[in-house]
Image (tube, rainbow, N blue to C red):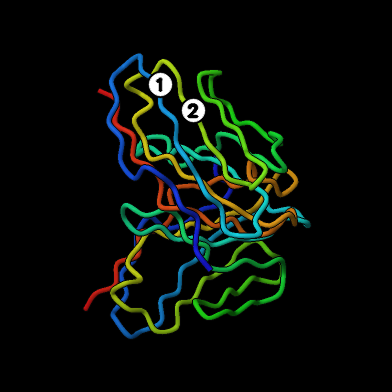
Amino acid sequence: KAGVTQTPRYLIKTRGQQVTLSCSPISGHRSVSWYQQTPGQGLQFLFEYFSETQRNKGNFPGRFSGRQFSNSRSEMNVSTLELGDSALYLCASSLVDRFSPLHFGNGTRLTVT
Amino acid sequence: DAKTTQPPSMDCAEGRAANLPCNHSTISGNEYVYWYRQIHSQGPQYIIHGLKNNETNEMASLIITEDRKSSTLILPHATLRDTAVYYCIDRTRGGGADGLTFGKGTHLIIQP
């Protein structure tokens, strides 16, 4: 079974631009969540989607948004990029069960210059 | 903040068992203990999870103390590819994806 796929793998943007990251979950997984990982802050929860609805949201500004499609694929968008948005953005998928393990993709490395 | 405590680093000889400890003294009755690992430049990889009984899968064994205040992840025959940062997590806040709080983990280095 294919794992979680994230595209693109690397991205370089300049301040003020916007970016869209894509995530394809494991087949059959309906929950998709997004995390930001930086050396200083570690892994921080962004949001979780289930059945095209945002189920939970972390403590990030409104510049960070996401959505989920009917096939469970998800995208996240960051507008008006700041230097501090440089990070590894990770997507994870899981089954419906509330304690199902999350399975992560290898992330998108975003660099903002 | 993470609610678990792990040593920052450990060494283990290749072929030996690697035993990674974790303290989760504030864990509540309905919280599971999860273990993940992250190899440089990759996403975290799920290893194993448990509630109160010991668990084993193809990757590792998880030993949880009777009072559930601590656990040990055991990699029975460590290889160089097991070098990674290992995270012990108690899943909080209803078990949703927001309940996964990763601390700093243990950097396990397998020595040839």
Residue B61 lies, with reference to residue B46, above or below; the image says: below
The residue carrying pointer 1 sits among few (fewer than 14), some (14 to 19) or many (20 or more) residues within 10 Å by Cα, namely: some
Query: In front here: A42 or B58?
Result: B58
> What percent of the width, then of the height, locates residue B60?
51, 77
The chain letter under disc 2 is: A
Residue B63 lies, with reference to residue A5, above or below; the image says: below
Query: In front here: A95 or A99?
Result: A95
Inspect the image, locate mark 1, and give the three-letter code of the amino acid beneath it. Gln
The picture quadrant where one finds residue B98 is top right
Callout 2 touching callout 1 (CB < 8 Å): yes
CA gap between label 2 and label 1 equals 7 Å
The picture quadrant where one finds residue B61 is bottom right
Q: Are marks 2 and 1 on the same chain?
A: yes
Query: In front here: A11 or A97?
Result: A11
The residue carrying pointer 2 sits among few (fewer than 14), some (14 to 19) or many (20 or more) residues within 10 Å by Cα, namely: some
Residue A77, label in figure: 2
- List the residue tagged with mark 1: A18
Q: Residue furthest front?
A: A70
How many marks on residues? Answer: 2
What is the secondary structure assignment of the residue under circle 1?
loop
Residue B78 lies, with reference to residue B1, above or below; the image says: below
- Point 35% across, 84% down: residue: B16
> What percent of the width, then of the height, locates residue B37?
44, 61
- Point 39% across, 84% down: residue: B77
The chain letter under disc 1 is: A
- Horizontal side of B13 relative to A24 (left or right) equals left
Inspect the image, locate mark 2, and give the three-letter code of the amino acid beneath it. Asn
Residue A83 lies, with reference to residue A12, above or below; the image says: above
